[in-house]
Amino acid sequence: MPPALLLARTTLTEARRGGLPWLALGCLALATGLAAFLSQVAVTESRELQAAFAAALLRAGAAFLLAAHIAASLVRESNDKVLELALALPLSRSQYYLGKLAGFGACGACLAAAFCAPLLFWAPPEAVALWGLSLACELLLVGAASLFFAITLAGVLPALAATTGFYLLARSMAGIQLLARGPLAEESIAQSVARGAVDAVALLLPRLDAATRADWLIYGLPAPAEFGTTLGSLILYCTLLAAAGLFDFHRRNL
Amino acid sequence: MNAGERALQAVPGRIWAALLCALALHLGVQTLRPAPAAEAADLPPPPSAQTLRAASLGEPAALARLAMLYLQAFDLGAGNTLPYRQLDYVRLEQWLRAILDTDPRSQYPLFTAARIYAEVDDAAKSRRMLEFVHQAYLKDPNRRWPTLAHATLLARHRLRDMPLARRYAADLQRLTTDPAAPLWATQMEIFILEDMDELEAAKIVLGGLLAAGRISDPQERRFLQERLEALERRLASKP
């Protein structure tokens, strides 16, 4: 087996033997229970409410669990000098980095598959399948971002804070752009500068608001072109993050 | 016991005492606090639809429905129709409009406007809600005709405002082009001109919606069934 794949397998095994499966189960139980409770309070659209709420909660929960797991795992490896030991073996830095990314990507795919299951109660299987595929790609991106920040910042809290900030900003950027261009925004130099700054930040971020949408579960499947573009842009951004991470990793003195 | 842990006896007595005292104090304070109560008058100004969209983190469908549950908490908690009247209907309409703009495909804001907030014994407030439903209908007739059909009945039977009911009915007839819309909906004008009582009309409309399979949600079906029974009781108690 190639060394990178071997590393990916050990990364997956580490996640399976750690607390991640139990935390995922807890997240599933919480989302399903809360959705069931809220549907009892609703006077109409109870099925849609359950699907939308559970999907939104599971999506955010999966991203947070994966980012926290990656940050904790990599910082522990760094503190225990496992990284130095691994690089002393016939394993290049690129193989190590990409092997880790593949392992965390596989963790994300497993989480996405598990988190799709309860949604089958409230949404058609084909919509759930597309939602799950999009979630797997989104988690691959979160994994790439978390790996990048954990290796660059070398601390659990800074890495988790940076990943969370990046993820929230990427998801809310379209809304922030709408706010900046809204009818209440006055025309002034300061406003134009602020709008330009918002547009510049948006240019650097992936459009996570367009991915893994609960709308797909409620109102029907997205157009194939729209879905393809969304997934393609997520994978492209993962490549960018992986390249940036490799660049930083190769420059580091260990 | 885990190998990495010491026995409970290893914890000093003062730590035990501090823990138990703090727990007892917390429970005492929580017990003495009054239960949270819904205050109909305190509906805050709504955020704009753009702010709601930005806050939804790309999940407008989920946030719109959670915002509706938040709005419901200002009235349904009391369990009767009196608090609805105490609500500030100007703000209520702003909230419903912002939520509908956040997720235009949701029927929830229109359903509550027509079936809950418009059914108060206050003609001005009821008119405000019916007008909100009518304006929303004009933007998407083929999705929103069921709520305007109910609003037409309310205008005819509760407000006894025939010109208003005919205006709504005429729009229903003119603008609804959905082939799945039943005949009674697109011929509402004739329907309301007939000398029919409120219960009979409501039964036809609800029966039609159920027969057409448009009400598949169990919560909505239960809610409408309860409303129909309440209407039957109200009309039976009239001399």
Image (spheres, helix red, strand yellow):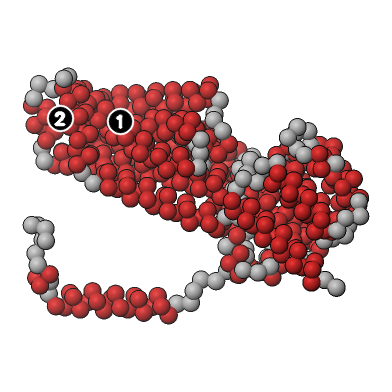
Give residue B96's position: percent from left, percent from top. Answer: 66, 52
Left/right placement of residue A182 relative to residue A207 reads right
Question: A58 and A202: which one is in front?
Answer: A58
On the image, which quarter does residue B161 sit in? bottom right
Q: Does B97 appear above or below B180?
A: below
Where disc 1 sits, the SS reads: helix
Q: Earlier in the sequence, mark 2 or mark 1?
A: 1
Residue in view at x 60 percent, y 48 percent: B217
Q: Is residue A130 visible?
A: yes
**How many C-alpha atoms fall within 10 Å of the one at disc 2: few (<14), some, or many (≥20)?**
few
Question: Looking at numbered disc 2 in the image, what kind of residue is underneath it?
Answer: Asn
Q: What chain does mark 1 sit on? A: A
Give the mark count.
2
Question: A226 and A30: which one is in front?
Answer: A30
Q: Is residue A155 visible?
A: no
Same chain? Circles 2 and 1: yes
Question: Looking at numbered disc 1 in the image, what kind of residue is underneath it?
Answer: Gly
Q: What chain does mark 2 sit on? A: A
Residue A196 - label: none
**How many C-alpha atoms fall within 10 Å of the one at disc 1: few (<14), some, or many (≥20)?**
many
Give residue B233's position: percent from left, percent from top. Answer: 74, 67
Residue A105 - label: 1
Residue in view at x 80 percent, y 59 percent: B199
Give residue A203's position: percent from left, percent from top. Answer: 47, 29
Left/right placement of residue A252 relative to residue A173 reads left
Give residue B59's position: percent from left, percent from top. Answer: 51, 42
Left/right placement of residue B193 relative to residue A130 reads right
Residue A253 - label: 2
On the image, which quarter does residue A129 sit in? top left
Eye-nearest disc, 2 or 1: 1
Where disc 2 sits, the SS reads: loop
